[in-house]
Image (cartoon, grey):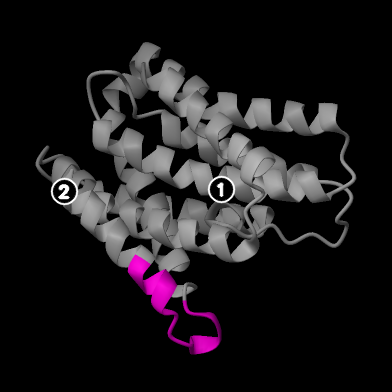
Amino acid sequence: MSVLILFLSVIIGAAIVLILKPNQKITQILLSFSGAYLLAITVTHLLPEVFQTNQKNISFFIILGLLIQLIMDYFSKGAEHGHIHTHNHKQLPTVLFISLCVHAFMEGIPINDHEHQELLWAIVVHKIPITIVLGSFLLHSKVSILKSLSILLVFALMSPLGSYIGSNITFLLTYNTEITAIIIGVFLHISTIIIFESSENHKFNMVKFMAILIGFGVAFLM
């Protein structure tokens, strides 16, 4: 079921682009909500979970996750938190796409049908607006429809693939807590950047602020 939910999150994001064609302001509001939700779930559920295991060096793996995302940002140009900056608007850079896929694959590894349900929904809430950003870029670029659909399909399969592999390879099951800690570091990096960027030019934006509050509220109610 988790694999299906992860796959459908990208399909939903793509459908929103095709049907509603949201503008940049709406997309930024969705990103603000997802960033707040992601941060709240990370702090209230995921952090306590990994520290309750009493395993050593968990903090090290969280920092490692932050550093990994920092490196991936160099290649993705910030696509994981809603920015696709390219000099050539006709094509999606291969390195950027690979970075997005690696990020999506890593997110899925700790997830299975019996554990980490909070992590599952945090990824879903995060992945929908990211798909909207990616889909909007593809829609307004000169990438062919067939290639655009192929890109979205591959992206949609990455997290389910990570979940499947993470649930069936003994090594990954053994170090599930450490991997979750790395993902926590990744989420802390992404969510805080999204929230800090919610006020453009250091100006207070009430709509985005409300989206952030709602994101926190929904996470605390879960």
Q: Residue at image x 30%, y 44%?
A: 181
Residue 32 belongs to magenta span: no
Q: What are the residue bounds of the magenta stretch? A: 199-210
Task: Classify mark 2: helix, strand or loop.
Answer: helix
Horizontally, residue 146 falls left or right of residue 81, namely: right
Q: Is residue 53 above or below residue 86?
A: above
Q: Residue furthest top?
A: 168
Q: Which residue is mark 2?
A: 221
Q: Is residue 148 above or below residue 114?
A: below
Which quarter of the rendered picture does the C terminus lie within?
Answer: top left
Residue 207 belongs to magenta span: yes
Which quarter of the rendered picture does the N terminus lie within?
Answer: top left
Residue 33 sits in quarter = bottom left
Q: Residues within 10 Å of mark 2 (few under 14, many from 20)?
A: few
Horizontally, residue 80 falls left or right of residue 52, namely: right
Number of numbered labels in the structure image: 2
* Mark 1 or mark 2: whose residue is earlier in sequence: 1
Horizontally, residue 48 falls left or right of residue 115, namely: left
Give the amino acid type for the residue marked by disc 2 in the picture.
Leu
How far across and down, in percent of the image, does residue 142 sit?
A: 90, 45
For the question of whether residue 64 can be seen, the reply is: no
- Residue 130, label in figure: 1
Q: Residue furthest front?
A: 20
Give the amino acid type for the residue marked by disc 1 in the picture.
Ile
Principal SS element in the magenta part?
helix
Q: Nearer the viewer, mark 1 or mark 2?
A: 2
Residue 168 sits in quarter = top left
For the question of whether residue 191 can be seen, the reply is: yes
Q: Is residue 16 above or below residue 85?
A: above
How far across and down, in percent of the image, does residue 156 sit?
A: 58, 28
How far across and down, in percent of the image, does residue 190 sit?
A: 45, 58
- Looking at this view, is 80 or 69 the one in front? 80
